[in-house]
Image (spheres, rainbow, N blue to C red):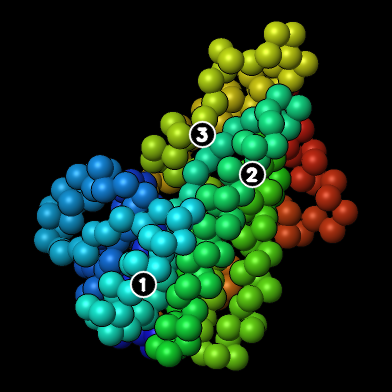
Amino acid sequence: MSGTAVPGTVLITGTSSGIGLQAAVATARSGHTVVATMRTLEGARALRDASATAGVTLDIRRLDVTEPGSITEVIAHMLDRYGRIDAVVNNAGAGHVGTIENEGLDVVRAVMEVNFFGVVSVTRAALPHLRQSRGRLITVTSVGGVVGQPFNEAYCAAKFAVEGFMESLAPVAATAGVAVTVVEPGAVASSFIDNVGLDPRASPPNDPYASALAGYLARAAQSFSAAQSAESAGASVAALLDGERPPFRVQTSDAARAFVGVKLADADGSAVQRMTAGWLD
């Protein structure tokens, strides 16, 4: 898959909903064999319905990125059944909203475990097989992996870590024929925003950040009201498995490109600080 891609065998994590679900269906529609995984198969119904509607077949498996044994099991299954792994799409992740003074380090560690170490674990397990196939490693990060955002300290830290990891890995993997890409969606209409673990009613008494949080939540609601569809974002991910070697960094919408463009052109950091401070009024 490092040059012009031909149909191959693709592992996608986090396919129970949103971008992962749509990417799995779109990838199968392109002719690839898709092993679509999720943390618990209790969430597989939506994926099965979507694949049936699209007229494609998926190999649906359980894979929890925080459990090394389940990663090993799926990799072994793919090698036993298909004999190769041509691409991996690291999509599994979990949102989180909160600020460090109001939450414990255990919460931050849990966010890092899913969003960073889970990606690292899957990548490490898959790389020997991607080397053999000269395949592709695609990781869905976020515009939050480029621009730090208020009340997203742990989440953005994890996504920043993923971006740094992959940016460092990319030239090394390229020497072995593996193409590495990060995908940066902006706001996407999915269940992601419902799973960030925030209960505004649970704010500490006399919370000094309550007003700023209210401003942030109002801005987030506005952003997600005009969000990119999960189908569109998933199609952007699936497209990276076909054609010539993709670039290292890809955004899934014009809004995402404009957003990360502020950071990438901001040598002293002042433009980003002005932008995000305005969200808290």
What amino acid is labelled 2 in the image?
A: Arg
Where in the figure is residue 42, as x and y percent of width and height?
25, 42
For the residues carrying marks 3 and 1, which lies nearer the camera in this image?
A: 1
Residue at the (32%, 47%) spot, across then down = 40
Residue 190 percent coordinates (x, y): 39, 40
Which residue is under mark 3?
196
Image marks 3 and 1: residues in contact by CB distance under 8 Å = no
State which quadrant residue 141 falls in: bottom right
Instruction: Tell me which label, 3 or 1, sits earlier in the chain.
Output: 1
In the rendered structure, the answer to whether residue 244 lies left or right of residue 168 reads left
Q: Nearer the viewer, residue 144 or 122?
A: 122
State which quarter of the image contains the C terminus: top right
Q: What residue did someone put label 1 on?
A: 75
What residue does disc 2 label?
A: 109
Identify the image quadrant of residue 77. bottom left
What residue is at 73 percent from the left and 54 percent from the top?
263
Label 2 vs 1, first from the N-terminus: 1
| Label 2 with label 3: CB-CB less than 8 Å | no
Secondary structure at badge 2 equals helix
Report crowding for label 3: few under 14, some 14 to 19, many 20 or more residues within 10 A (C-alpha). Answer: some
Which kind of residue does numbered mark 3 sit on? Val
Closer to viewer: mark 2 or mark 3: 2
Q: Is residue 201 above or below residue 244?
A: above
- Residue 86 bears which disc, if any? none
- Label 1 secondary element: helix
Q: Mark 2 to mark 3: distance in Å?
A: 15 Å
